[in-house]
Image (cartoon, coloured by chain):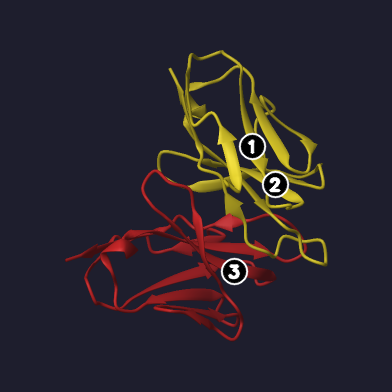
Amino acid sequence: DTAVSQTPKYLVTQMGNDKSIKCEQNLGHDTMYWYKQDSKKFLKIMFSYNNKELIINETVPNRFSPKSPDKAHLNLHINSLELGDSAVYFCASSQSSNTGTASRPQYFGPGTRLLVL
Amino acid sequence: RKEVEQDPGPFNVPEGATVAFNCTYSNSASQSFFWYRQDCRKEPKLLMSVYSSGNEDGRFTAQLNRASQYISLLIRDSKLSDSATYLCVVIPSGGFKTIFGAGTRLFVKA
């Protein structure tokens, strides 16, 4: 049983289109994340939701809009796709600590490879 | 200065060698530390958490030096399957922001 799953695995689209990526975790975690890994392989956090509330938004363009319908799901919608959005997007989840922080390890989904033409 | 810095490598070592990676962090209030490995075209996977007293998991040993603000990973008796990119992860105290290092590439050769 996959712990953190993402769909689709691959996404090829034209500039200007709108697309969504979905993420689900069955680990019972209360925190979920979106990361972007660019061509230089640098992994950078984009968003984090804790108990369905947005708690991190790391200077990401507002063309990117995350949505968390419940604690097990975190989706990412991207409007007006640009060439620079081409990257691998990883979803992750973790269980927050007793103090309400992210001191516990995160578990990643397999990634969505987005190519904007 | 980057928040988390790692030597990008690559490290090329023969099977059976011992190899060590270091990672420095800039925020002295950082509270949680991890090592992840990432294989080519795969997701990062947790290798081990790093505890203040140091910890070992089989051939892998992690150390934390809060005074000097660095963590290290030692791999003994390297295997071909250890070839991967090793990512240092730091979480500052009081929040959820997670900072990944750029990774250190390891090639283990027969």
On the image, the x and y values in percent for residue A60 come to: 65, 35
* Looking at the image, residue A63 lies above or below residue B106: above
Give me the residue at 56% from left, 44% from top.
Answer: A109
Label 3 – label 2 distance at C-alpha: 18 Å
On the image, the x and y values in percent for residue A90 come to: 55, 42
Badge 1 element: strand
Badge 3 element: strand
Give me the residue at 50% from left, 42% from top.
Answer: A110
Q: Colour of chain A?
A: yellow
Label 1 – label 2 distance at C-alpha: 9 Å
Q: Colour of chain B?
A: red
* Looking at the image, residue B72 lies above or below residue B26: below
On the image, the x and y values in percent for residue B77 come to: 29, 78
On the image, the x and y values in percent for residue A3 come to: 60, 48
Q: Are marks 3 and 2 in contact (CB under 8 Å)?
A: no
Classify 10 Å Cα crowding around label 1: few (below 14), some (14-19), many (20 and above). many
Give the residue number, with chain letter if any, for mark 1: A23
Give the residue number, with chain letter if any, for mark 3: B33
Classify 10 Å Cα crowding around label 3: few (below 14), some (14-19), many (20 and above). many
Q: Is residue B82 left or right of residue B34?
A: left
Q: Is residue B84 left or right of residue A36?
A: left
Badge 2 element: strand
Three-letter amino acid code of the residue under disc 2 = Met
Give me the residue at 73% from left, 58% from top.
Answer: A95
* Looking at the image, residue A112 lies above or below residue B105: above
Q: Are marks 3 and 1 in contact (CB under 8 Å)?
A: no
Give the residue number, with chain letter if any, for mark 2: A32
Three-letter amino acid code of the residue under disc 3 = Phe
Q: Are marks 3 and 2 on the same chain?
A: no
Q: Are marks 1 and 2 on the same chain?
A: yes
